Amino acid sequence: MLGLLFKDLLSIARQAKIYLFLIVIFSIIPDASMTAFAIVYSAMMPITALAYDDQSKWNTLAVMMPYSRLELVLSKYLFGFGAMLASALLCTIVRSVLGIFNVGEPVTAADMLAKMAAGAALICITLPFMFRFGVEKGRLLLFGIVGITIAAGFFLDKAELPEISASTLSIAAILAFAILVPGSIWLSVKAFGRRNCF
């Protein structure tokens, strides 16, 4: 599994540098909603890795290697969740440093958790389609979901919603993703096997 994650990281090394630069820029902009862009962008990293897999015919080689369908699929989910966590930590650090100088809006745990939940939902919804139809055919779906996610993020950020404690939000997110994540992985394994004839 670590080998698969390392392979994905190496394949997008150049894009990762741009990714880190953009996250810092989004974090510096004095608007807490800009962190949503960083989270959503990081959630698309496994899709970029999938695109490189398609171009390099990686799946043909993977058939001859001691990896199961579950491992090949799960590595993309872990890669995406790891990228989101790194993005959230980097945004939090940058915002905290700026907060010392009273620059920008503070980032709360509940706010960051909500944005990470949106990014995780993006991963869970798009990856089964990407595994089944490939990145090229799945791009239209991706653009549509990203647009809806960003719009929803702005709406939730500007709307006057009742205060929800971080603990309540955490419990709700855990329960939701306890169902969504395993279901998405199961669909991706089925889709990947059907597309690549494992």
Image (cartoon, helix red, strand yellow):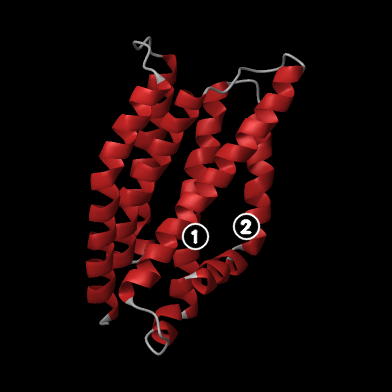
Residue drawn 38% across and 50% down? 123
Q: Residue furthest bottom?
A: 64
Left or right position of 155 against 102: left
Residue 61 in picture, x, y percent from top left: 44, 86
Mark 1 or mark 2, which is nearer the start of the sequence? 2
Residue 44 in sight from this viewpoint: no
Observer-nearest residue: 177 or 21?
177
Observer-nearest residue: 192 or 170?
170
Residue 94 in picture, x, y percent from top left: 69, 31
Residue at numbered disc 1: 48
User: Quick one: label 1, few (<14), some, or many (20+) residues within 10 Å?
Assistant: some
At mark 2, the secondary structure is: helix
Residue 51 in picture, x, y percent from top left: 46, 66
Residue drawn 34% across and 66% down? 134
Residue 102 in picture, x, y percent from top left: 72, 13
Residue at numbered disc 2: 15
Tell me the amino acid under the disc marked 2.
Gln
Residue 96 in sight from this viewpoint: yes
Residue drawn 26% across and 75% down? 193
